[in-house]
Image (spheres, rainbow, N blue to C red):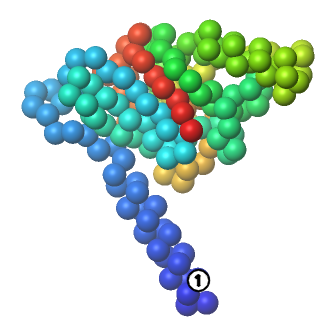
């Protein structure tokens, strides 16, 4: 019992330590915003959204997704978060999720994967590809879902509200977003 108590404490400590590295930023002079062109890499296996600018790494934030399997989105309704190269197409203040940064899913690459999966019979012939994917905050007062790595979206990427407000402040249409496992 003492061993399992110790292992449980060690696991909790590692998640706490892990959480501390998130929302860390490169120290820069000025207004504290990235310099030049910004791009985003979302790593589903690490539950991280990392921002890069002209000088390299700028910031890393914790994120959560849709389905716990962390599989690539195959069709509408599977709650999976898509993988691939995308761009932010629009952004807006959102009534439920604080901020919403739309990405261009489905794009040409998404349709190619979708049609190939249909051709191979991986997904039903009458399946739809889906859409409406973006980066957004959590329900009000529910940032804890990110701290607990609780996937809850329908396929979007969810961040803590303060983090999505910060990301929203320095990204715009055309920002490149890579989502990978």
Residue 127, given in percent of the width and then of the height, sits at: 84, 18
Position of residue 28 relative to residue 116, above or below, is: below
Viewed as shown, does residue 146 lie left or right of 123?
left
Position of residue 132 relative to residue 16, above or below, is: above
Residue visible at 55% across and 90% down in the picture: 2
Q: Secondary structure at mark 1?
A: helix
Who is closer to the viewer here, 64 or 129? 129
Residue 130 seen anywhere in this rendered image of the structure: no
Looking at the rendering, in which quadrant would you find the C terminus? top right
Residue visible at 62% across and 9% down in the picture: 108
Viewed as shown, does residue 38 lie left or right of 31?
right
Residue 73, given in percent of the width and then of the height, sits at: 69, 28
Farthest bottom residue in view: 2
The residue tagged 1 is 4
Residue visible at 36% across and 23% down in the picture: 39
Residue 149 seen anywhere in this rendered image of the structure: yes
Who is closer to the viewer here, 181 or 127? 181
Residue 133, given in percent of the width and then of the height, sits at: 60, 21
């Amino acid at each position: 019992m003492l061993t399992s108590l110790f292992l449980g404490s060690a696991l909790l400590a590692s998640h706490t330590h892990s959480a501390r590295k998130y929302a860390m930023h490169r120290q820069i002079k000025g207004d504290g915003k990235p310099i030049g062109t910004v791009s985003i890499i979302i790593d589903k296996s690490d539950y991280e959204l990392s921002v890069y600018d002209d000088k390299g790494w700028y910031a890393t934030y914790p994120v959560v997704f849709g389905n716990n399997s962390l599989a690539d989105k195959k069709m509408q309704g599977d709650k999976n978060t898509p993988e691939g190269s995308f761009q932010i197409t629009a952004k807006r203040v959102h009534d439920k999720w604080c901020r919403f940064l739309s990405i261009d899913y489905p794009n040409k690459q998404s349709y190619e994967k979708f049609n190939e999966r249909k051709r191979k019979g991986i997904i039903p012939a009458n399946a739809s590809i889906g859409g409406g994917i973006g980066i957004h905050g959590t329900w009000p007062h529910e940032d804890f879902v990110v701290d607990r790595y609780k996937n809850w979206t329908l396929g979007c990427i969810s961040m803590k509200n303060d983090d999505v407000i910060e990301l929203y402040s320095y990204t715009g249409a055309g920002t490149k977003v890579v989502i990978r496992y």
